Image (cartoon, rainbow, N blue to C red):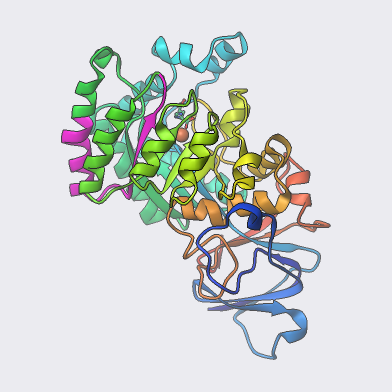
Amino acid sequence: MRTLVKNIKELVQVEYQQRLRVCGKDMATLGTIKDAYLIVDGDRISEFGPMSELKEQSFDKEVNATGRMVFPSFCDSHTHLVYAGSREIEYIDKIRGLSYDEIAKRGGGILNSAKRVQEATEQQLYDDAVQRLEQMIRMGTGAVEIKSGYGMTTEAEMKMLRVIRRLKESSPLTIKSTLLGAHGIPMEYRGRQEKFVDLVVNEMIPRAAAEHLADYIDVFCDAGFFTVEDTERMLETGAKYGLRAKIHANEMACSGGIQVAVKYNALSCDHLEYTGDAEIACLLGSETMPTVLPGAAFFLNMHHAPVRKMMDAGLPVAMASDCNPGSSPSGNMQLILSFACVNYRMLPEEAINATTINSGYAMGVSDQLGSIAVGKRANFYITRPIPTYEYMPYAYGENKVERTFLNGVEV
Ligand code: NIG
Ligand code: FE
């Protein structure tokens, strides 16, 4: 099947040479073509350029995009979107002044979701996740990383990972799966959390690997959660089983999480509210993508990661939704673009790079997704009529996506 999208007001994030990520001041540049066409052959992008260069040929389907722009789909490299129930009651506790930490200490937070996931059937978890994915597709997302982490027992973690595997098989989205066995410390392990780390190392990682249920391994390495030593044990075991790391780090404190991520060549380290000069120096020259989660910082009303400073130092930055019931109950990446600009003083070009090619890198798919390039997977969206690409972050809170194509097929 060959599809032509013609009269595109502006084709955004075009690339002629493959890049896996964009760093530092290059993040402020964005390749675009005004009055453009795009040709899709099967599930791939086969050609694009200015309308004046479009050659006479026949297509199975033609889309006239007059007044509209085309963007590569967002890559959402950090989500916890398999969960049961919602946590709006804790949200009220937070409004009344309890901290995330205090809620976690009294068994709320992650443990609250864990109880519900343990009780839920696989089918119910799957059905709820499908609905969330459908909403995300309508908002322009084309690739999603999904973590386990609300299991707390080996059985419940494997159940979550099986749900993610089923989503991979049935969804048009590109999905990556991450084992986050060490997300919280169950009550019965408080004061002897090394025993819980034993469980992750001796049971969860080997089982997830034996059943090919995970692409990556994650640990919540932060003050009040898992220590650097705990994290090292789990990442070492993960590496033995071929699982590359993606780490939750430095959300609560300068926890050493960034350093341990770099030491183990993690694909990404995420959150990063507490990032100082030593952490920036450590990330420079590494292959670890610093990933900021503006939805969680907004929802928890935290201070913001020093994104401007990181980019000025030459680092790449990725951004993802962190979609989860506790700290970021939204998978809307258009909103992330707006947060990026307003809260982190990113230019629209930087925000677009952070949510496409760089977040694609952070989930290991930027060779296939995250830009408009010949040979890449045809995951893109057509906007409704908009004046400029800067309008995308500017007009926050409304859906600017009109039509979505995944694997070359309109969904
Ligand atoms: O990425 N920081 C740790 N984990 C999640 C929160 C999960 C929850 O509160 O349920 C996060 O924000
Ligand atoms: Fe998270």
Q: Quadrant of the C terminus?
A: bottom right
Q: Is residue 200 one of those drawn in magenta?
A: yes
Q: Looking at the rendering, which quadrant does residue 309 occupy?
A: top right
Q: Residue at x 75, y 80 (%)?
A: 51
Does residue 278 appear to the left or right of 161 in the view shown?
A: right
Q: Position of residue 198 (x, y in %)?
A: 18, 28
- The answer to whether 51 is drawn above or below residue 157 in the figure is below
Picture layout, residue 325 above or below residue 112? below
Tell me: 197 left or right of 32. Answer: left
Q: Is residue 107 left or right of residue 59?
A: left
Tell me where residue 258 appears, x and y as whole percent.
43, 36
What range is drawn magenta here?
199-223
Residue at (48, 23) in percent of width and height: 253
Number of labelled discs?
Answer: 0
Q: Residue at x 27, y 47 (%)?
A: 213
Within the magenta stretch, is there residue 11? Answer: no
The answer to which quarter of the image holds residue 120 is: top left
From this viewpoint, which residue is outermost toward the bottom? Answer: 56
Q: Nearer the viewer, residue 327 or 281?
A: 281
Residue 9, percent from left and from top: 78, 67
Q: Residue at the left extreme?
A: 202
Determine the residue positioned at 70% across, 54% down: 349
Residue 233 appears in the picture as rendered = yes
